[in-house]
Image (cartoon, rainbow, N blue to C red):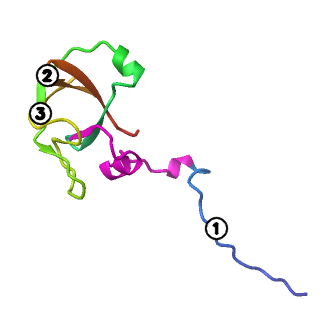
């Protein structure tokens, strides 16, 4: 009698085991690769995107809170994106808090930006 045994090495597919999946907040590199014209800025390590075309963000009643920052630098392709840096907003634009949505006051207009946070 001869018995043959063997080992089968297999990989775990994260889609089959959701508990092993990892998520992360989008990076500026990922965002700008998908859309080089994206209107974004970074505040406290979180990327915020212009939410002018997101209906629920526009319909949400918000109260402008305290000023939490000011755009200090304009992004130039190839440099490291950092806090208070923006792709479209001018230097000096003020950022106000309102939860996950931040509001930028630009020339008397309120522009809403949504934080891109993965859960």
Vertical position of residue 3 compared to residue 48: above or below: below
The residue depicted at 59 percent of the width and 57 percent of the height is 13
Q: Where is residue 92 drawn, in percent x and y?
A: 8, 34
Residue 1 sits in quarter: bottom right
- Residue 81 — which label? none
Give the structural element (helix, strand or loop) at label 3: strand
Residue stretch rendered in magenta on the structure? 18-42
For marks 2 and 1, give the one nearer the viewer. Answer: 2
Work out whether residue 99 can be spotted.
no
Cα separation, mark 3 vs mark 1, equals 49 Å
What residue did someone put label 3 on?
A: 69
Q: Earlier in the sequence, mark 3 or mark 1?
A: 1
Q: On the image, which quarter does residue 79 sit in?
A: bottom left
| Residue on which disc 2 sits | 107
Q: Position of residue 64 (x, y in %)?
A: 18, 17
Q: Mark 1 points at which residue?
A: 10
Q: Tell me how far mark 3 sits from mark 2, CA to CA.
A: 16 Å
Residue 41 point in image, percent of width and height: 23, 39
Q: Work out whether residue 16 or residue 111 is closer to the camera in this orientation and state it.
A: 111
Query: Left or right of 101: which side holds 12?
Result: right
The disc, 2 or 1, on the residue closer to the chain's N-terminal end is 1
Instruction: Left or right? Give the position of 36 relative to 75.
Output: right
Viewer-nearest residue: 46 or 57: 57
Q: Nearer the viewer, mark 3 or mark 2?
A: 2
Element type where label 2 sits in the image: loop
């Amino acid at each position: 009698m001869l018995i043959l045994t063997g080992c089968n090495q297999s990989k775990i597919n994260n889609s089959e085991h959701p508990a092993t999946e990892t998520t992360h907040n989008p990076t500026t590199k990922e965002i700008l690769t998908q859309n080089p014209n994206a209107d974004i800025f970074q505040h406290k390590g979180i990327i915020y995107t212009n939410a002018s075309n997101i209906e629920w963000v526009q319909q949400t009643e918000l109260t402008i809170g305290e000023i939490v920052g000011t755009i200090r630098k304009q992004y130039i392709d190839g440099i490291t994106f950092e806090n208070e840096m923006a792709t479209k907003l001018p230097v000096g634009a003020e950022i106000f808090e309102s939860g996950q949505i931040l509001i930028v006051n630009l020339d008397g207009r309120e522009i809403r930006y949504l934080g891109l946070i993965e859960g």
